[in-house]
Amino acid sequence: MKLRKRGRIVVHIILLLGLIIVVFPFIWMLLTSFKTHAEAVQVPPCIFPKHLNLEGYTKIFTELPFLQVYCNTIISTIVTVVAQVVLCSMAGYAFGRLEFPGKNVIFLLILSVLMVPGQIFLVPQYLIIMHMGLLDTIAALFLPNLFSAFGTFLLRQFFMSLPKELEEAAVLDGCNQFQTFGKIMLPLAKPGIVSLVIFTAKFAWNDFMWPLIVNTSLDKTILGPALSALQGQYTNDYTGQMAGAVLSVIPIVILFFIFQKQFIEGVAQAGIKG
C-alpha cells in the first residue's frame, strides 16, 4: 500500500510539473502584456508588473490596423473551416463507404501529401495565386487551404466506424446516395467534424508563413504576420506583441471550451480506428 501511495504521489508530482511547463508560457505572455518596455527587457527578469500598464494594448490599435487584421483572420478561418468540412466530409465518405475503381490507390496518393513538408508547396502555390492575379488579396489567404488530406483521413475513419445496416435501412426507406450521406451518415460523424473544425480553425488562425509570403500589405494579412511587424531591426516591442498574442488566442480558447467534450471524443475515436 505504501509503495502504491508513493507511486501515486510521484505521478502527481510529474503531472504537476508538466502542467507548470505547459501553462507557464501563457502566464508569462499575459503578465508581459501588462508590463512597461523596461520591465519586459529587465535582467534579471521581472515576473509581475509593478503597475497595470495598458501601453501594449494601445500600441497594437494605433500602430497596426488591428481590427481589420482581426476581421481578415476571422474571414480566412471561417471560409477555410466551412470549405474543409464540406469537401473533406464528402471525400471521407466516398473513401470510407463507397466502392469505385482505384479507390485505394487514390487514397494512398492523397495520404502521401501528409508525408511531404508543407514548405515544398509554397513556391508552386505562390505562382498559381500570382497567375490568378490574387496576390495581396483576402482570397489568397485561404484558397490553398480549402481541402486537406488530414481532414479526409480523419473523417474517413469516422465513416468507416459506422454500421453498414444504417445505409441499408436508408436505402429501404427510399433514400438515394446523397440523401443517405447528408441525412443519415453526416450527423453521426459529428465528433469527427467537430475535431476537424477545431484542428482547422487552429491552423488557419495561427497560420504565419503563407500569409507572410502572399500578402505584403498589413491591412490584407492576418494576426501572425501583422504582429511580427512590431519586431524592429534593433529592438522588439515585446509588450505590444504579447498584448496582440493575448487578444489573438481568446477566440481559440473559447472555441475549445465550448466544444471540448466533442473534441476529446473525436480525437479518441479517431485514434482507436486509426
Image: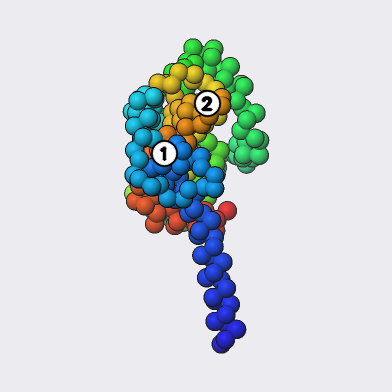
Residue shown at 34% from the left, 51% from the top: 258
At numbered mark 2, what does the secondary structure look like: helix, strand or loop? loop
Left or right of 244 on screen, residue 116: right
Give the residue pinned by disc 1.
36
Residue 232's disc is 2
Judge whether 267 appears above or below 129 on screen: below
**Is the image coloured rainbow, by chain, by secondary structure, or in one colour?**
rainbow
Residue shown at 49% from the left, 16% from the top: 135
Residue shown at 54% from the left, 14% from the top: 130
Left or right of 128 on screen, residue 174: left
At numbered mark 1, what does the secondary structure look like: helix, strand or loop? loop
Q: Amino acid at mark 2?
A: Gly
Which percent across, then down, holds residue 52?
34, 44
Q: Which mark is in front, 1 or 2?
A: 1
Which percent across, then down, holds residue 13?
54, 69
Distance between the Cα atoms at labels 1 and 2?
A: 17 Å
Q: Amino acid at mark 1?
A: Thr
Which percent across, then down, holds residue 233?
56, 24
Q: Earlier in the sequence, mark 1 or mark 2?
A: 1
Q: Quadrant of residue 18?
A: bottom right
Judge whether 82 appears above or below 188 on screen: above
Packing grade of label 1 (10 A; few <14, some 14-19, many >=20) is many
Which percent across, then down, holds residue 272?
55, 58
Question: Can residue 128 be seen at all in this image of the molecule?
Answer: yes
Left or right of 6 on screen, residue 195: left
Judge whether 105 appears above or below 14 on screen: above
